[in-house]
Each structure stands twice: as C-alpha cells, then as structure tokens.
Image (cartoon, grey):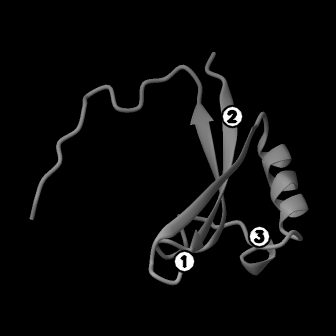
Amino acid sequence: MATTVFLVEHLHLLSHGEEDIKRIGVYTSRALAVAATERLAKQPGFCDFPTIVDPAVSVSNAQGFYISETVLDLDYWSEGYVTTTE
C-alpha cells in the first residue's frame, strides 16, 4: 500500500519576477495541511497571499499556499528527461 503525504509550500513573486518559495511542512493528511495554512495565513508575509491555490483553476504562478499530495518511495522521473532549446 502506498503512503501519501501532503507538502505545503507558499509562493510569493518578488518585484523583479523571481519566485520566493517557502516550504512550510509535510503532513500526514490534507486536513492537517489545510490547518497549517490557516495558522500561517495570519502571519506577516503570508497574510499578503493567504489563500490556497488550486493549480487546476488558477493561472500560472498564482501567489499563495500550494498543497500537493506526494506518494512516498516512488521514483517520479524513472524515464529520465530531455531538455530542448528553442
């Protein structure tokens, strides 16, 4: 049986376009991950972008909290990768 965890990160775009990503924590349930965002959403910096971003409906680089479900002990890039130049 695969074990999943929930990674919480916060994205803030700096004035020159650079991404400032903070890893908040890894939680054993979505409910605990959401609770973490609710605690931090009141804190300096986080309160400027306090919402949880749904990547399925949000624009690219939307600022706020991201929760991603991750399977433990799984190779995600098992086929390698190719970088192309345009």
Q: Which residue is mark 3?
A: 46
Q: Residues within 10 Å of mark 2 (few under 14, many from 20)?
A: some
Q: CA distance from mark 1 to mark 2?
A: 29 Å
Q: Which residue is mark 2?
A: 5
Position of residue 12 measured from the top left corner of the image (x, y, whole percent): 60, 71
Q: Earlier in the sequence, mark 1 or mark 2?
A: 2
The residue located at (58%, 59%) in the rendering is 21
The residue located at (54%, 19%) in the rendering is 73
Q: What residue type is disc 2 on?
A: Val
Q: What residue type is disc 1 on?
A: Leu
Position of residue 54 measured from the top left corner of the image (x, y, whole percent): 61, 65
Asked if disc 1 and disc 3 are in contact, CB closer than 8 Å, the reply is: no
Between circles 1 and 3, the one closer to the viewer is 1
Q: Quadrant of the N terminus?
A: top right
The residue located at (41%, 31%) in the rendering is 76
Q: Quadrant of the C terminus?
A: bottom left
Between circles 3 and 2, the one closer to the viewer is 3
Residue 13 in the image: above or below residue 74: below
61 left or right, relative to 83: right
Q: Which residue is mark 1?
A: 14
Position of residue 4 measured from the top left corner of the image (x, y, whole percent): 66, 30
Q: Earlier in the sequence, mark 3 or mark 2?
A: 2
Residue 52 in the image: above or below residue 67: below
Q: CA distance from mark 1 to mark 3?
A: 13 Å
Between circles 1 and 2, the one closer to the viewer is 1
67 left or right, relative to 44: left
Q: Secondary structure at mark 3?
A: helix
Q: Secondary structure at mark 2?
A: strand
